[in-house]
């Protein structure tokens, strides 16, 4: 997976199930088999630092931005 693309993904606005890899990170539903699809990043309370989350995606959304 392209590191540049991973760095561009923002996890802001994603739900708990999406950030904890229980549903597709793109649509928030469990639509078929879920597979690893890189990482998204959220900004915690401390500005300037990012938290990385390993996310999963369904076949339809794998590789989406």
Image: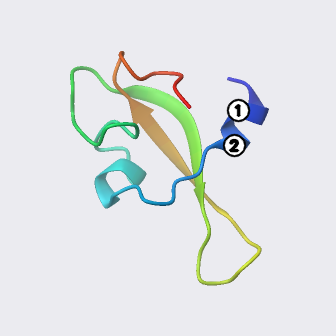
The residue drawn where x is 33% and y is 36% is 24
Quarter in which the C terminus is drawn: top right
Q: CA distance from mark 1 to mark 2?
A: 5 Å
As drawn, the residue found furthest toward the bottom would be 46
Q: Is residue 16 above or below residue 61?
A: below
Q: Is residue 22 above or below residue 4?
A: below
User: Label 2's element?
Assistant: helix
User: Label 1's element?
Assistant: helix
The residue drawn where x is 36% and y is 16% is 59
- Between 29 and 33, the one nearer to me in the picture: 29
Q: Is residue 23 above or below residue 12?
A: above
As drawn, the residue found furthest toward the top would be 59
Colour scheme in the image? rainbow
- Between 8 and 3, the one nearer to me in the picture: 8
> In x, y percent, where is residue 48?
77, 74
The residue carrying pointer 2 sits among few (fewer than 14), some (14 to 19) or many (20 or more) residues within 10 Å by Cα, namely few
- Between 34 and 62, the one nearer to me in the picture: 62
> In x, y percent, where is residue 37?
51, 30
Q: Which residue is mark 2?
A: 8
Q: Which residue is mark 1?
A: 5
Q: Is residue 3 above or below residue 20?
A: above
Quarter in which the N terminus is drawn: top right
The residue drawn where x is 36% and y is 49% is 18
Mark 1 in CB contact with mark 2 (< 8 angstroms): yes
> In x, y percent, where is residue 61?
41, 23
> In x, y percent, where is residue 7?
72, 44
The residue carrying pointer 1 sits among few (fewer than 14), some (14 to 19) or many (20 or more) residues within 10 Å by Cα, namely some
Query: In this rendering, would 6 be left or right of 12?
Result: right
């Amino acid at each position: 997976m392209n590191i540049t693309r991973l760095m561009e993904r923002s996890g802001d606005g994603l739900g708990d199930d999406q950030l904890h890899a229980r549903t597709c990170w793109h649509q928030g539903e469990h639509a078929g088999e879920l597979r690893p699809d890189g990482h998204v990043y959220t900004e915690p309370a401390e500005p300037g630092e990012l938290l990385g989350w390993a996310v999963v995606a369904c076949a339809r959304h794998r590789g989406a931005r």
